[in-house]
Image (cartoon, rainbow, N blue to C red):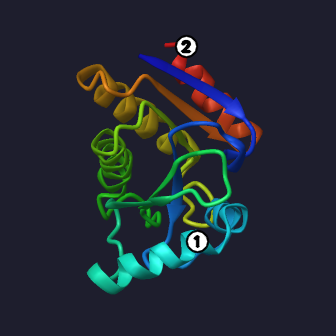
Amino acid sequence: MNLEVIKGDITKQKVDAIVNAANGSLMGGGGVDGAIHRAGGPQILEECKEIVANQGRCPTGEAVITSAGKMPAKYVIHTVGPVWHGGKNNEEEKLAKCYTNSLKLAVQNHCKTVAFPNISTGVYHFPKEKAAEVAVTTVREFVSKNKEIEKVIFVCFDEENFKLIISLLRK
């Protein structure tokens, strides 16, 4: 099992799958979601529209997969993180499901390398320290039981998330 953290742009990662912190509509948005849709091109949006036509919105904690369009990755796994409401609405459990369900989808699609952003820590206001703990704990637990995943990269956009993840990976 190989867990890494880098500070950078998730859309540039040469991995089997990058994870998108999507909204339930899957139609693109701000932050990492908008960046992925812009970098991947219209193919991703078209595939997302098909998914929504077939199943409706993507619920919080669930994940769906599309191609990666023009990006170097093969796939984009779109997962809907929870909006932080003070921790009283099972936000940590829902965030853990984002990581677990994304990794399950990666395994089902024969992905060996996966890159994650910091899900829910932007406009969804999930406290970064709690989100980092959930991310690292959940990913570690999953990959310890599922040998198909060879490498997970936490791709941090900002210094605070980078420092939080790196300190947790050193433990």
Left or right placement of residue 81 versus residue 109 in this view: right
The image quarter in which residue 40 lies: bottom right
**Residue at image point 49% right, 72% down:** 23
Mark 1 crowdedness (10 Å alpha carbons): few <14, some 14-19, many ≥20? some
The image quarter in which residue 136 lies: top left
Farthest residue, direction top: 171
- Point out residue 113 in the picture as x, y percentages from the top left corner: 48, 32
Q: Can you see residue 26?
A: no
- Point out residue 129 in the picture as x, y percentages from the top left corner: 55, 39
- Point out residue 120 in the picture as x, y percentages from the top left corner: 52, 57
Q: In the image, what residue type sits under mark 2?
A: Arg
Instruction: Judge whether 113 appears above or below 35 on screen.
Output: above
The image quarter in which residue 30 lies: bottom right
Element type at mark 1:
helix
Farthest residue, direction bottom: 53
**Residue at image point 47% right, 63% down:** 84
The reply to whether discs 1 and 2 touch (Cβ–Cβ < 8 Å) is: no
Badge 2 is on which residue? 170
Q: In the image, what residue type sits under mark 1?
A: Gln
Instruction: Judge whether 169 appears above or below 9 on screen.
Output: above
Which of pointers 1 and 2 indicates the residue nearer the eye? 1
**Residue at image point 50% right, 39% down:** 16
Element type at mark 2:
loop
Mark 2 crowdedness (10 Å alpha carbons): few <14, some 14-19, many ≥20? few
Q: Residue 23, which numbered label?
A: none
**Residue at image point 31% right, 61% down:** 62
Left or right placement of residue 1 versus residue 148 in this view: right
Q: Residue 43, which numbered label?
A: 1
Q: Which one is earlier in the sequence, the residue at label 1 or at label 2? A: 1
